[in-house]
Amino acid sequence: MIPDVKQDFLQKLIDTAKKNYPEMKIRSTQIGIARTTYHQAQISWFDMITPSYIYNPQNTVNVVNPNIFFGFSLAVTVNIGQLLAKPYQIKNARQAVDVAYYQQQEYILTLTTNVKRLYYNYVEALAELRVRVRAEQDAGTNVKQMKTKFEKAEASLKDYNDALVIMYTQTSYKIQGERSVLTAKVDLEEFIGKKLEDIN
């Protein structure tokens, strides 16, 4: 089985899985969202500042409520709580970017391991199928020889029946091997997002 493992093809499968598997796209999108949140936190320093204006149309001084300015006046208020919390919010947003990146790196390792495992299962199923096909062919050859011997009265009916039972058993094993190959292929194609035949 080991000579059947092709490292170049396996690397192509891993690269294709990284491009096509939806979870990889989700992880990349999460990094983008975290970066956007970080940039928003960086420029949100102005959120704590509230500008406003005051209009005083009086031209005379009011003794009860004296105003120095007449007409339009600009007022600015600063939220001290937000001013003190802003550096921590920015730090948290930066750490969220790091966490999203680390989660993506972790998933790449998991995806790579899964693709390798599924590829090895596929190669194993192919190797096992080759053995089962040869066993079925040998059993078929044995049945033909036994049939000839039986017709010439050189073998008993029991020997001929035993050869038939072995051939049917080997055919059943071959069918199970074909199913194993198809199942392993489908499992691998699920992760790479393409048919194996489409990978060059």
Image (spheres, rainbow, N blue to C red):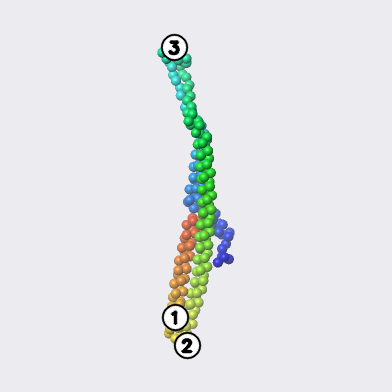
Could you classify mark 1 by the number of other residues whose Cα lies within 10 Å: few (under 14), some (14-19), or many (20 or more)?
A: some
**Numbered disc 3: secondary structure:** loop
Q: Relative to the observer, which residue lies in front, 140 or 2?
A: 2
- Mark pair 1, 2: CA separation: 15 Å
Tell me if residue 192 comes above or below residue 96 in the rendering. below
Query: Residue sitting at 50 percent across and 74 percent down?
Result: 135
Q: Is residue 47 visible?
A: no
Tell me if residue 70 comes above or below residue 153 in the rendering. above
Q: Relative to the observer, which residue lies in front, 38 or 12?
A: 38
Q: Nearer the viewer, mark 1 or mark 2?
A: 1
Answer whether labels 1 and 3 touch (C-beta < 8 Å). Answer: no
Q: Earlier in the sequence, mark 1 or mark 3?
A: 3
Could you classify mark 2 by the number of other residues whose Cα lies within 10 Å: few (under 14), some (14-19), or many (20 or more)?
A: few
Answer whether labels 3 and 2 touch (C-beta < 8 Å). Answer: no
Tell me if residue 81 comes above or below residue 120 in the rendering. above
Query: Residue sitting at 53 percent across and 53 percent down?
Result: 109
Q: Earlier in the sequence, mark 3 or mark 2?
A: 3
Answer whether labels 1 and 2 touch (C-beta < 8 Å). Answer: no
Q: Position of residue 197 (x, y in %)?
A: 51, 60
**Amino acid type, residue under disc 3 in the picture:** Val
Q: Relative to the observer, which residue lies in front, 90 or 71?
A: 90
- Mark pair 1, 3: CA separation: 121 Å
Q: Is residue 112 visible?
A: yes
**Numbered disc 2: secondary structure:** loop
Q: Position of residue 116 (x, y in %)?
A: 53, 59
Query: Residue sitting at 53 percent across and 56 percent down?
Result: 113
**Amino acid type, residue under disc 2 in the picture:** Glu
Q: Position of residue 13 (x, y in %)?
A: 53, 57
| Residue wearing tag 2 | 154
Quadrant of the image for the C terminus? Answer: bottom right
| Residue wearing tag 1 | 162
Residue 61, disc = 3
